[in-house]
Image (spheres, rainbow, N blue to C red):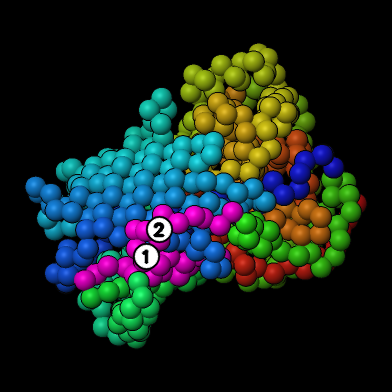
Amino acid sequence: MTKIRWSFVGGVFVTITFLTLLAIHLEIFRKNPDPLPVQSAAVQRPAETWMNIYQNYKKIGVVHRTFTAADKGFHFTEKVFMQINTLGVIQPINISTKGDLNADMTVSSFNFDLTSSLFRFNAHGYVANNKLFLFTGLPDAQQKSEIPLNVIPHMSGSIYDAAFRANLEKDMSRNFSIFDPSTLAMRSIKVTRQADEIIPVLGKRILAQKYCADFMGVNTCAWIGKEGEVLKETGIMGLSLEKVSPEKAQEGIAQEGSIDLALIASIPADVKIDGAESLKQLKIKISDMGGIFHQLNGGRQSFRKGVLTITREQIPSSTAQSPVRELPPDITFFLQPSPLVQANHPQMKEQVDKIIKPGDLPEQKIRKIVSWVYRHVEKKPVVSVPNALEVLKNRVGDCNEHAVLTAALLRTAGIPAQIETGLIYMRGRFYYHAWNIAYCGDWITVDAVFNQFPADVTHIRLVRGEGSEQLDLVGVMGKIKLEILEQTK
């Protein structure tokens, strides 16, 4: 086994959890399928709100929100600072969201910026002519998207604002669609109004409306005051937010004691696996997967009657992977760049030309690129939206950064490549992890974190795809069960 710190494999869980928090809490875009009755209090809330972020009652961050009238509508800002324990490393994260709303509270323009210790992600855009014009990435590698809109979306600091404005009665539910710019994903979220509760806020007891949301099996709740201001929120992994005074918001953040998210999400193995790299086949009973069982079947994985069989791949012969062989359209699609996998960018081309030689067979290109990423990207957990160009520049990251950079380099070299996300066995537990598949006559699993081609059979694919597909894991995290049935060498 290669000498890599085992804990670095869990970074994908931290990133997915973090993106889930963004999708639910920041809720950059929301569009409602039907017109909703509006409470006037929704635009009369206090101009400024401070909230502390807690994890198991220890302060790990602070939120500052403003909401003010403007010439043609409203202007809002939300600034978030957090410190998250990722694989034993405490990482600072700054999130800034600001924008302008029309008089009917629909969005006019917005800017979203996320900065962690090593990486930065930006998304900004505006609405015009029934389209959302969206720009993602930093200025030197910006991607533009145009998204048709059936209705102009709303924008605010929380999904619960929409439920409050809908004037839901007790036990009433409503479905909303949310758009997350970090993954370009549209997802559905169900919000239910529950019985009102009295909660302590700034030393007083306040009667608040309680709303709970179900996002892909993840449940969160919020308590809202009579003016439409969110007073308290509870979320996943022991996270919560509470309204505080500006003075209390400025108090220090806990440096110790926060939970390592990747570790608590890992799954204990009932049987020890020795010599994973030498295994030819692995059979596992798998359950509590929710609605993503269909991602388990295909390629080297076969899922039948609750049993998953993973068979080590054979690399095709050189005749099957000729560089001049014409590829089917469904394969060549995975040569294209995407917002976070910037294949064919000049910087990617320059690097690929240093790694491979003209005339290299697909297998040789894959080996060289996987090995180069393994040797030149420092293994270090980070929290951000993985971006291949940023990784190429910084040369550091966990499995997410390795996977996006490997995909971008392979595609630039003419090798179709995709990203897979799932679980990998390490030291008696299964951790959430990300890796790649590359095409050289057949799809072969590769892992640049461990320099494996093909990757060992303890890599359990749960989903395949980039940002939006990875959110499918949200519903199974903390629920999935594994039982090792057979190991074949």
Give the residues drawn in magenta, as a range.
227-255
Left/right of residue 340 with respect to residue 46 in the rendered view: right
Q: Residue at x 46, y 61 (%)?
A: 53
On the image, the x and y values in percent for residue 479 come to 62, 70
**Which residue is at the front of the view, 374 or 43?**
43
Q: Residue at x 79, y 64 (%)?
A: 269
Give the amino acid at mark 2. Ala
Task: Tell me if residue 325 comes above or below residue 302 in the rendering.
Answer: above
Q: CA distance from mark 2 to mark 1?
A: 6 Å
**Which residue is at the front of the view, 279 or 74?**
74
Callout 2–callout 1 Cβ contact below 8 Å: yes
Residue 205 is tagged as none
The answer to whether residue 419 is seen in the rendering is no
**Which residue is at the front of the view, 38 or 291?**
38
Q: Residue at x 75, y 35 (%)?
A: 451
Q: Earlier in the sequence, mark 2 or mark 1?
A: 1
On the image, the x and y values in percent for residue 176 come to 32, 65
The quarter of the rendered structure image containing the N terminus is top right
On the image, the x and y values in percent for residue 5 come to 76, 44
Mark 2, residue position: 249
Residue 244 is tagged as 1
Give the amino acid at mark 1. Val
